Image (cartoon, rainbow, N blue to C red):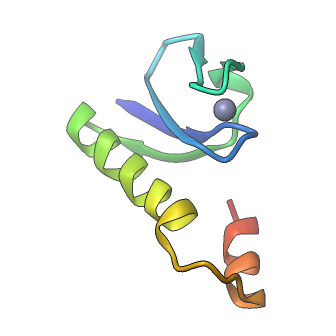
Amino acid sequence: MYLVFRCDCGRALYAKEGVATRKCVCGKTLKVKERRIFKNVETAEDAVYVVQQMQEENYGKTGFTTADSIKFHRRF
Ligand SMILES: [Zn+2]
């Protein structure tokens, strides 16, 4: 099982279940148990896929932000 979660900087990360901490590229070390888990998946491939989806959601959109998309992001 792999856990997918977000860093405070907004990046999506994944960790194998049972791993205590995960370091984000922003330099912050996250305690996996204290994060709100976005998704549990079975394989590393699935975890990578979910992370990519989350990243695209963050950075892949065109330059403007609507009220709707802010509401959407806050659910996570
Ligand atoms: Zn980060």
Q: Is residue 15 left or right of residue 48?
A: right
Ligand 1 shows up in the quarter that is top right
Q: Please provide percent x and percent y for residue 44.
A: 26, 32
Q: Quadrant of the C terminus?
A: bottom right
Name the residue rendered at 57%, 62% in the picture: 58
Most extreme residue toward the front is 63
Residue 74, image quadrant: bottom right
Q: Is residue 50 above or below residue 27?
A: below
Q: Please provide percent x and percent y for residue 1.
A: 35, 30
Q: Is residue 64 above or below residue 42?
A: below
Q: Is residue 56 left or right of residue 59?
A: left
Residue 72, image quadrant: bottom right
Q: Is residue 65 above or below residue 21?
A: below
Name the residue rendered at 37%, 52% in the picture: 52
Name the residue rendered at 68%, 68% in the picture: 73
Residue 75, image quadrant: bottom right
Along the line of sight, the residue nearer the viewer: 7 or 59: 59
Q: Please provide percent x and percent y for residue 57.
A: 51, 66
Q: How many marks?
A: 0
Q: Is residue 19 left or right of residue 11?
A: left
Along the line of sight, the residue nearer the viewer: 15 or 58: 58
Q: Please provide percent x and percent y for residue 2.
A: 38, 31
Q: Is residue 55 above or below residue 27?
A: below
